[in-house]
Image (spheres, rainbow, N blue to C red):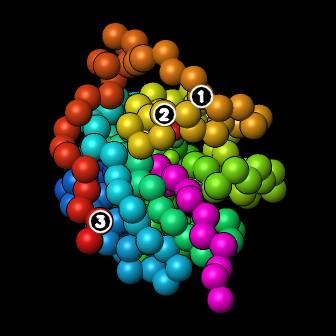
């Protein structure tokens, strides 16, 4: 029996408490999940908040291979967020951990609570910069693929290398 194994990219973010420890813990929990293998992560970046003013984030992207359907992979992400004590107060507010499903193979999914590729990923340097480290031509919303203009000076100021890739073992 060879289950379909799909390559997916997950966006990780934290801007409360020990941010790096939260990213590390999230990767450990993903790696322990049945049907999810974490292959590698990007470097960790410190990033200026986009949207409401709040503390700086640490962001990274993880490459996973999974036998789970996209909906279950999303459910896994939300369960890990909950289990790590994420509290949802104001929309777009600070959070101990955020796990976003960015892409799931080449699937394009458009359901009310599951849109893949992530509809705003190509507009967010805190997602694109780490993602491009792992995949130079990622699938974007609308079935297009990114073709690389290097990060601008403005991007470099908002997305700053902070730590090496996370341990995936
Ligand atoms: C106007 C209104 C312009 C809202 C932008 C942008 C809202 C991004 C939410 C927006 C708007 C978001 C992170 C973040 C957030 C993160 C960094 C979001 C959700 N999450 N900033 N802001 N990293 N650097 O992970 O992405 S809130
Ligand atoms: Mg997010
Ligand atoms: Mg999220």
Task: Quadrant for the N terminus, please.
Answer: bottom right
Label 1: which secondary element: loop
The residue segment tinted magenta is 1-11
Disc 2 within 8 angstroms of ligand 1 (CB): no
Q: Distance between the residues labelled 1 and 2?
A: 7 Å
Label 2: which secondary element: loop
- Residue to which mark 3 is pinned: 168
- Residue to which mark 1 is pinned: 146
Mark 2 crowd level (few <14, some 14–19, many ≥20, 10 Å Cα): some
Mark 1 crowd level (few <14, some 14–19, many ≥20, 10 Å Cα): some
Q: Do the residues labelled 1 and 2 touch (CB within 8 Å)?
A: yes
- Residue to which mark 2 is pinned: 136
Q: Does the magenta stretch include residue 6?
A: yes
Label 3: which secondary element: loop
Quarter of image, res 132:
top left
Q: Distance between the residues labelled 2 and 3?
A: 21 Å
Query: In the figure, is residue 144 to the left or right of 81?
Result: right
Mark 3 crowd level (few <14, some 14–19, many ≥20, 10 Å Cα): some
Q: How far apart are marks 3 and 1 (CA)?
A: 26 Å
Above/below status of 151 relative to 21: above
Is residue 164 visible from the viewing direction of this image? Answer: yes
Is residue 95 visible from the viewing direction of this image? Answer: no
Above/below status of 3 relative to 26: below
Q: Where is residue 35 in the image (x, y as percent from the top left)?
A: 53, 79
Above/below status of 159 relative to 20: above
Is 85 in front, or is 110?
Answer: 110
Disc 1 within 8 angstroms of ligand 1 (CB): no
Q: Residue at x 23, y 62 (%)?
A: 167
Q: Residue at x 55, y 70 (%)?
A: 66
Is 138 in front, or is 73?
Answer: 138
């Amino acid at each position: 029996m060879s289950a379909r194994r799909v390559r997916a990219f997950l966006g990780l973010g934290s801007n409360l408490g020990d941010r790096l420890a939260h990213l590390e813990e999230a990767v450990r929990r993903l790696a322990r999940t049945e049907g999810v293998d974490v292959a590698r992560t990007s470097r960790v970046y410190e990033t200026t908040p986009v949207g409401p003013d709040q503390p700086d984030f640490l962001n990274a992207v993880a490459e996973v291979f999974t036998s789970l359907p996209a909906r279950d992979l999303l459910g896994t992400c939300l369960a890990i967020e909950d289990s790590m004590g994420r509290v949802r107060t104001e929309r777009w507010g600070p959070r101990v951990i955020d796990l976003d499903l960015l892409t799931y193979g080449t699937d394009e999914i458009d359901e009310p609570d599951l849109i893949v590729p992530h509809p705003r990923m190509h507009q967010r340097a805190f997602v694109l910069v780490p993602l491009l480290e792992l995949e130079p031509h990622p699938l974007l919303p609308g079935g297009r693929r990114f073709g690389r203009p290097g990060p601008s000076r403005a991007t470099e100021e908002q997305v700053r290398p902070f730590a090496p890739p996370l341990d995936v073992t």
